[in-house]
């Protein structure tokens, strides 16, 4: 069984053979009238950049964004059009049936929208355990019980209603076109389909909807086109309380936990982004329920604290890998203990990214020897916190606004369940919860009660859509898929750009690696630039074990120098870039 095909080696026995891999509180949005009439024309603003730019995971979403910019749309209009388009043309990860995070910088102010999925009301802490307390294999990954309540449609609705300039119908139009008239399937997409189909065979209705997805052929999705048309006509309420909600709950009935009440109560949340100062930049990134933003800021700051140790250490040398792995150990120890949904636990974000705390953690690192895994404990003490196939795209508009968006179904094509009569692939995000303390999930990461399953709770994520600003202006927009590799990948690309002065394309092409505390002293490398030869020998001599994974990421990045945006797509994917002048 190999749902998350990004990693070859199993990291923990508890991954069960996986390659690592009430009230009805109706959303205020639902009380608004249907958005059919669109918005009043926006005031004309002077452009501050030479063009608008995008870095997206496929060419169809690039065309959609270009159309939106040509119609006068801003970064948020383009982002919502990209997200709906990818739900059609990048169906392994783009979605209506999943969730994600959007980091925004609009009119000089940072915002963060959490449209992560939530556990259904009927979810229980031990729902994936048998009577002996053991994890039931695949239950949180495949089929109806793996599905959490989707957030993408309310997320796009809230973002576009708040900040978009165009009519809602305009941002839906490209997606409706690709669903109704079809798009030509890329070879990589068919490969993902074929791999996923093996995992879902006999367990879900996946092939009814995606059986005909063949490379080079035009793939049409009439049911999904009808859903998108209703969302275009009626807004998000169709998905959460209308005909689409009826279709979703009819599909789940008798199989899964999600009900109409779950959909009606779903609401995306505007949160304060995590922010930190680093090298003269303001890093604006994802707060809990993501661990990614906290992890990214911890890594950046601790690496800066260790500047004397990194001096003269060549990038991606054995010593470099060792030092970064030591930082990652500490970050993943904190992640497992303190990170979860802030609506359920008061996550100590400020303390976790506090400069003296991180300086102390960094100072504990032995520059020569890998530290003993057992000795790495969460840094704020072990008391519990107080109760309290992903894709990324980056957008900057000519007015200097930016959107960094990562959203996901979790595994490729999610749970394998497709809503009958709607063609919506549903997520398997329930696997991001900690099903049992200390048991690893698909990505090999462990968690504590902070990330235990509770009704309406959001599972802990690693997604970290990030924006860097300098002197109040956007400097970098970046993000990637990759599960627990997300923020370690973003960290490496950011440091390649700013610490090692690499051009964007070189920074994206550079080798990336990953360590996450468990399994002990294990460094994951990727097929794109494997760790081999002398480097492998040097790391093994230091006491590290090397494991291959199939995937590290698909980073989409935009850098702004002066008034010139430059966009780059990861050579590991089929992403593309545009600058629209
Ligand atoms: O939220 C998370 O961290 C995961 N569900 C992301 C999954 C992912 O990145 C898979 N993609 N490659």
Image (cartoon, rainbow, N blue to C red):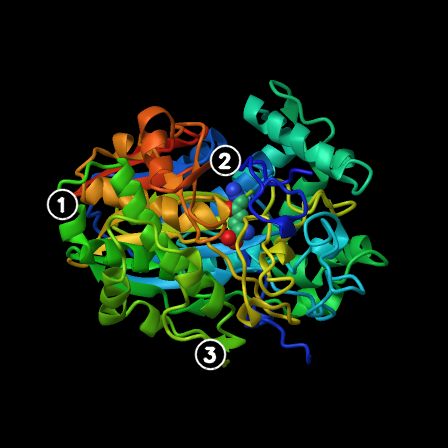
Asked if residue 368 can be seen in this view, the reply is yes
Q: What element carries label 3?
A: loop
Give the residue at mark 1.
Answer: 311
Tag 2 secondary structure: loop
Q: Position of residue 481 (x, y in %)?
A: 47, 44
**Residue under label 3:** 383
Quadrant in which residue 215 is drawn: top right
- Of pointers 1 and 3, the one earlier in the residue sequence: 1
Which mark is on residue 264?
A: none
How many angstroms separate mark 1 from mark 2 (CA)?
29 Å
Q: Residue furthest right?
A: 254
**Could you tell whether 299 is left or right of 116 in the image?**
left
Which numbered disc flags the more N-terminal residue, 1 or 2? 1
Q: How far apart are marks 3 and 2 (CA)?
A: 34 Å
Q: Distance between the residues labelled 1 and 3?
A: 36 Å
Give me the residue at 40% from left, 41% from top: 544
The image position of residue 146, as x and y in percent, is 70, 54
Quarter placement of the N terminus: top right
- Residue 502 x/y as whole percent: 20, 35
The mark that comes first in sequence, 3 or 2, is 3
The quarter of the displayed image where residue 381 is located: bottom left
Within 10 angstroms of label 1, few (less than 14), some, or many (20 or more) residues? Answer: few
Q: In which quarter of the image is residue 69?
A: top left
In this image, 123 relative to 93: left or right? right
- Towards the viewer: 47 or 41: 47
| Between 62 and 128, the one nearer to me in the picture | 128
Q: Image point 26% across, 47% down: which residue? A: 476
Q: How crowded is mark 2: few (under 14 residues within 10 Å), some or many (20 or more)?
A: many
* Residue that mark 2 sits on: 549
Q: Quadrant of the C terminus?
A: top left
x, y percent for residue 226: 69, 44
Residue at position x 47%, y 42% from top? 82
């Amino acid at each position: 069984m190999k749902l998350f095909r990004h990693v070859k080696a199993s990291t923990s026995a508890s991954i069960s053979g996986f390659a690592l891999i009430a009230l009805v509180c109706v959303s205020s949005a639902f009380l608004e009238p249907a958005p059919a009439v669109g918005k009043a024309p926006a005031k004309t603003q002077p452009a501050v950049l030479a063009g608008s730019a995008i870095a997206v995971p496929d060419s169809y979403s690039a065309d959609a964004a270009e159309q939106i910019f040509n119609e006068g749309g801003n970064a948020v209009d383009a982002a919502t059009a990209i997200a709906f388009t990818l739900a059609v043309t990048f169906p392994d990860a783009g979605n209506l049936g999943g969730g994600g995070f959007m980091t925004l910088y609009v009119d000089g102010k940072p915002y963060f929208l959490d449209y992560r999925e939530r556990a259904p009301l009927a979810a229980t802490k031990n729902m994936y355990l048998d009577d002996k307390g053991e994890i039931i294999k695949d239950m949180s990954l495949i089929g109806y019980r793996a599905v959490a309540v989707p957030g993408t449609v309310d997320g796009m609705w809230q973002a576009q209603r708040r900040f978009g300039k165009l009519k809602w119908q305009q941002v839906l139009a490209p997606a409706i076109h690709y669903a109704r008239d079809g798009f030509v399937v890329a070879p990589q997409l068919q490969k993902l389909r074929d791999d996923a189909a093996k995992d879902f065979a006999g367990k879900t209705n996946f092939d009814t909807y995606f059986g005909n997805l063949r490379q080079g052929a035009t793939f049409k999705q009439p049911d999904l086109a009808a859903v998108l048309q209703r969302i275009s006509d009626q807004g998000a309420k169709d998905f959460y309380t209308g005909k689409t909600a009826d279709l979703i709950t009819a599909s789940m009935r008798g199989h899964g936990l999600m009900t109409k009440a779950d959909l009606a109560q779903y609401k995306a949340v505007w949160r304060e982004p995590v922010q930190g100062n680093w090298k003269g930049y303001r890093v604006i990134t994802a707060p809990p329920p993501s661990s990614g933003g906290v992890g990214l800021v911890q890594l950046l700051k601790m690496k800066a604290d260790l500047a004397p140790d990194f001096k003269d250490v060549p990038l991606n040398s054995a010593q470099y890998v060792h030092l970064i792995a030591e930082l990652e150990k500490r970050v993943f120890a904190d992640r497992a203990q303190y990170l979860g949904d802030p609506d359920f636990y008061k996550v100590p974000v400020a303390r976790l990214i506090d400069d003296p705390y991180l300086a102390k953690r960094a100072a504990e690192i032995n520059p020569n020897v890998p530290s003993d895994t057992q000795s790495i404990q969460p840094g704020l003490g072990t008391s519990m916190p107080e109760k309290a196939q992903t894709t990324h795209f980056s957008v900057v508009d000519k007015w200097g606004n930016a959107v960094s968006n990562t959203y996901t179904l979790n595994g490729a094509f999610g749970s394998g369940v497709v809503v009958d009569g709607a063609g919506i692939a549903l997520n398997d995000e329930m696997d991001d919860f900690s099903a049992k303390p200390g048991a690893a999930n698909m990505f090999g990461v462990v968690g504590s009660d902070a990330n235990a399953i509770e009704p309406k709770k959001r599972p802990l994520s690693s997604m970290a859509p990030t924006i860097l600003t300098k002197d109040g202006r956007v400097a970098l927009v970046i993000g990637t898929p990759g599960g627990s590799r997300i923020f370690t990948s973003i960290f490496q690309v950011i440091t390649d750009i700013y610490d090692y002065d690499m051009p964007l394309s070189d920074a994206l092409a550079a080798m990336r690696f990953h360590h996450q505390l468990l399994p002990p002293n294990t460094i994951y490398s990727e097929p794109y630039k494997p760790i081999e030869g002398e480097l492998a020998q040097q790391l093994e001599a230091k006491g590290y074990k090397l494991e291959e994974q199939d995937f590290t990421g698909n980073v989409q990045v935009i850098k702004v120098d002066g008034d010139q945006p430059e966009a780059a797509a990861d050579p590991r994917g089929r992403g593309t870039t545009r600058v629209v002048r």
